[in-house]
Amino acid sequence: MILRLMLLALVALMLASLVVGAAGMGPAALLADPQAGLLLAVSRVPRTAAVVLSGAALAVAGVVMQQVARNRFVEPGTTGTAEGAALGLLAVTLLAPGAPVWIKMAAASGAALAGAGLFLALIRRLPPREVLLVPIVGLVLAGVLQSVASFIAWKADMMQLIGIWLMSGEFSGVIAGRYELLWIAGAAAALAWFAADRFAILGLGERTATGLGLNAAAVMRLGLGVVSLVTAMVVVTVGMVPFVGLVVPNLVSRVMGDDLRASLPVVAAAGGALVLACDLVGRLVRHPYEVPAGTVLGVLGSLLFLWLLWRPVRG
């Protein structure tokens, strides 16, 4: 029932996304104006798909990252993964500016994987009971990597690119031919669903998972691969979208518990719906101008996260 409700909300938001924008476009306009159909195919449909894919993939990546790190207060945007992807993109842009998109994708994914691996290596040295130290270490690592990327970009006069990759969550420039990498992120998120039971067991701890017959190292590598690929594709295409991988998994787990096989589809639908709702608010709040969806989600996501911290768990 929860999944059906989330899918209905997502479909309603997608339909609204197709008609809301600087140029009003209803069913009558589609029948009367041939340019309206072109606008729908070139801009509105790709943008809607990009928003949904980004939100769904980042929400699932957040679940995977929380299981791998065994901490509910982390997500790809607070563990150095996004900053690593930005560093990889920056390196390719400086060393091989004419490189094809697949090289940029590979560099961003590899650098994101290195950032996530460094985060896990750091938190292994923390006392097991100091749960709140894990997100703090992630934030510190993300800040250090962002500072390195910003310094290099400042020296190379590329500060605007760093801002786009790490702090925008901007979908206004998405058109057909410039968002297709996000389908790879969607495929990676779908792969996580097939390994959902393994991630749930890994979340019990490496020793417990090994005792239950799970190859913990292999599942951890798979999880890091999913998180790195999703993060890199989103950063390359639209820039990092904050709070999705942190807020959505915690909200869903409050309602559905920790059965990842059942909850991951709901997490994906809720992530897509949340980002799409924020994108619609960004289009309407200063119509016909736009506020980036990442900015709207930064405000809403921080409020939701504070609510999660303050509201006690029941049942």
Image (cartoon, rainbow, N blue to C red):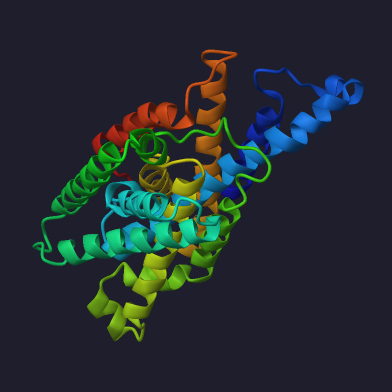
Q: Is residue 257 visible?
A: no
Give the tally of numbered discs. 0
Q: Give the residue at x 56% y 21%.
A: 283
Q: Which of 309/169 is in front?
A: 169
Depth check: 197 or 227 in front? 227
Q: Which residue occupies 36% across, 82% down?
A: 214
- Residue 207 visible? The answer is yes
Please report the residue visible at 59 percent of the width from the left and 43 percent of the height from the top: 50
Q: Write down the quadrant of residue 117 in the picture.
A: bottom left
Q: Residue 158 location, x and y as percent?
A: 35, 37
Asked if 209 appears above or below 69 in the picture, the reply is below
Quadrant position of residue 221 = bottom left
| Above or below, comparing residue 294 to residue 120 in the picture | above
Residue 39 position in % (x across, y down): 75, 30
Judge by depth and name the residue closer to the eye, 237 or 69.
237
The residue that appears at 25% across and 39% down in the rendered structure is 155
Residue 36 place in picture, x, y as percent: 81, 26
Please provide percent x and percent y for residue 241.
42, 40
Is the residue 134 above or below the residue 282 in the image?
Answer: below
* Extreme residue toward the left, this view: 127
